[in-house]
Structure formats: structure tokens, C-alpha cells
Image (cartoon, rainbow, N blue to C red):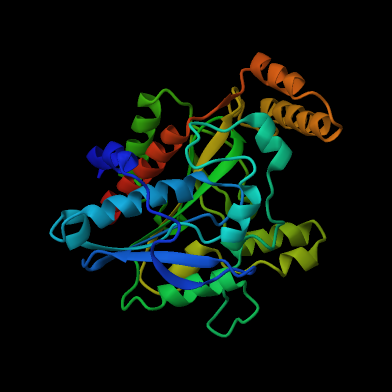
Amino acid sequence: MYDRIDTILDTTPMSRDDGDTIGNSREGRTIRAFRIGRGLQRISLIGGCHADEPVGPRMLRHLVAHLSSLPPDDPLLSTRQWWIIPHINPDGEERNRAWYGDDDDAYDLVTYLSHVIRELPGDDIEFGFPRDSDDAGARPENRAAFDWWHRAPQPFALHVTFHGMAFAAGPWFLIERAWKDRCKQLKERCVARVEEMGYMLHDIERNGEKGFFRLGRGFCTRPDSRYMREHFIALGDRETADLFRPSSMEAIRSMGGDPLTLVSEMPLFITPGVGRQLGPPDPVAKAWKERIDGWRSVLRAGGEPDEVETDALEHRLVAMPVRDQMTLQLTFLAAGLDQVE
């Protein structure tokens, strides 16, 4: 699949009105999904679980269009069956449209800081999937995906949820903990592509907080709802802890088999220097957080956007091109496909 990445991204993306309706959002918007191919190996892909992360859904709309254009005997379709939900969070998408467009080459910092909206912990869709088939309290978006996945006659081999980070040193790749010792080839592929494109890998040591166990520079285990709950309980916030349900990764694994689950994390804006001193604490990461919080305060107080833009330029903050983000998302997917073959 590596040699198709440019072709995929050059394909005109599918329309938001295409696909099968699998349910409706909390506010009544349609959730659409695609099942493409006739192979035995089932692949699950999802985007938009967090409202402020538009690149995954954008990439998936290109991928769906490409897969839909292929002849039935193409290896991508004859050996695999793709279950794709390009955007599971249409309400969140609508609320964030003030700061991004479908054709943006990169995102504007001031516009992002002025208009971004993200769900609170315990209400985000990624950690809102039903605990079981009788869990009527889950959000309708999560129920729709959960019920649709359970139409699959066999377990999935691979599940990838495409996420993003607002600010980071570079790409970050999260891997199913049960597979952490089986993904040498996957990691090598991703590292080579990141270096070829001239980026630094994001690196952070969180010592298992929320399920993040560092596997090496640029790689970590994926988060887990149990650790999420423990984190908020430790903070004395049992109310928020009790809101957490299984993630999409946990939901897919609960269906049986031993699927590889992956989470891509691509930064909208690159913060140089983060991770050079791993920490914790990482003094560069701390300085960036304080600086970004200061920019938000300036804008909320009615300050001049030019002031923020000038300061960002002086500190060498840059927006990561959207196409580069999508290229690395597809590289991660291609590596995952090779890993489960």
C-alpha cells in the first residue's frame, strides 16, 4: 500500500452524503459508514472521535474514494474487507468548522486558538463505546458504530483510530499493548518515513498514566479506559472517572480474536525542542504550554492576533502541512496491514 499513498491523496474525496447510514448523532446528524471489499481479513478504520481533530476524517474520505474506484480483483479488495467510518462525530465537526476548511494546506494558529472546541473528559466519543449490548447510556454515535461492527461475522484483524494533537514535537504512534513486542517492522517503517520527510518523532514519558507506556522514541502503548478511570480517581474526581466507557480499540478487541489496534497522533502545530529532555518534567514542553496558554489569554482579552503570530514565528512554531499528516497516517496504516498479514 505504500506505493499508493500519493494516488490515494490525489483522489477526490468522497462526499459527506455518501455511504450507508448507520445511525444519527446526539443532535440528529447522519453518521455514515462504508463496507468495501470481499476478502476474509476485516479492517476497521475510524476518524473524528475527538471533535477538534479533522485530519483523520479528511484522509479517510480520500481512502474511501480510492478503494471505491478499484476493480473487485484488486488485492486491497480481494483479500480484505474494509469497515470505515470516516467521521463518527458530525456534531463536533460542525462546531469546529469555524477554524478549518476541507482544502486547507495547513491550519492557522490564531483561528485555531480562537475557535477550537473539544468535548470534556468523559464525554468524548473515543472513550464512550458501550460496555455491553445492554448499555443504553452510551452516546448514540457510539451505539451506532458498536452495533454496526457487530454485524461482522468474524473478528477484525486490525483497527486504527486516527487522532491528532494540537501541539507536539512531531508524529507520535500508539500501539496495542498486547502487540508491543510484535511490531518491530511497523516501527521501522514509520521511523524511516518520518525521517525521510524531515520530521522529529514526538517523545514523552508518562509512566503508564492513562495507559501510556513508552516503547521508545515516537512510540507508546495506546490509552485504556481502566487507566483513564484510575487517573481521575487519583485526582479525587470519581464523577468523571465513572463516565469513561471502553475505547474503540477495546470495543473491537472485545469482539474476539487478537486484533492489532493502533492510534495515530499527528500534530497540527510543531513545537520544536519537546522531548529532547525526556523528563518528566520536560522543561521545553512546560515552557511551550505556558506560552500557548498566554496566547489564548491574549486572544480572549481582545489582543491583536499579530502579537500572537509574531511571537509564534519568533519561537519557530510551524503548522504541519495537512498532506504530510495524511501521508504519515497512511504509512502507519500500511505498516499495520503488513504487520497483521
Please name the residue shown 72% across and 70% down the image.
242
Q: Is residue 319 visible?
A: yes
> Where does residue 42 sit, x and y in percent of width and height?
30, 65
Please name the residue shown 52% across and 67% down the image.
30
Please name the residue shown 29% across and 56% down the image.
340
In this view, the residue in front, 161 or 35, is 35
In this view, the residue in front, 152 or 132, is 152
Q: Is residue 184 visible?
A: no
Q: Residue furthest top?
A: 314
> Where does residue 175 sit, x and y in percent of width and height?
45, 51
> Where does residue 320 sit, x and y in percent of width and height?
51, 30
Task: Tell me: 134 left or right of 161.
Answer: right
In this view, the residue in front, 23 or 313, is 23
Looking at the rendered structure, the number of numbered marks drawn on it comes to 0
Task: Tell me: 252 left or right of 330.
Answer: right
Q: Residue furthest left?
A: 73
* Up-down relation of residue 3 to residue 175 (above or below): above
Please name the residue shown 68% across and 44% down the image.
116
> Where does residue 4 sit, x and y in percent of width and height?
25, 41
In this view, the residue in front, 147 or 233, is 147
Q: Residue furthest bottom?
A: 134
Q: Residue furthest right?
A: 301
If the image is split into quadrants, where does the N terminus sit? top left
If the image is split into quadrants, where does the C terminus sit? bottom left
Task: Tell me: 290 left or right of 264.
Answer: right
* Up-down relation of residue 154 to residue 215 (above or below): below
Q: Quadrant of residue 287?
A: top right
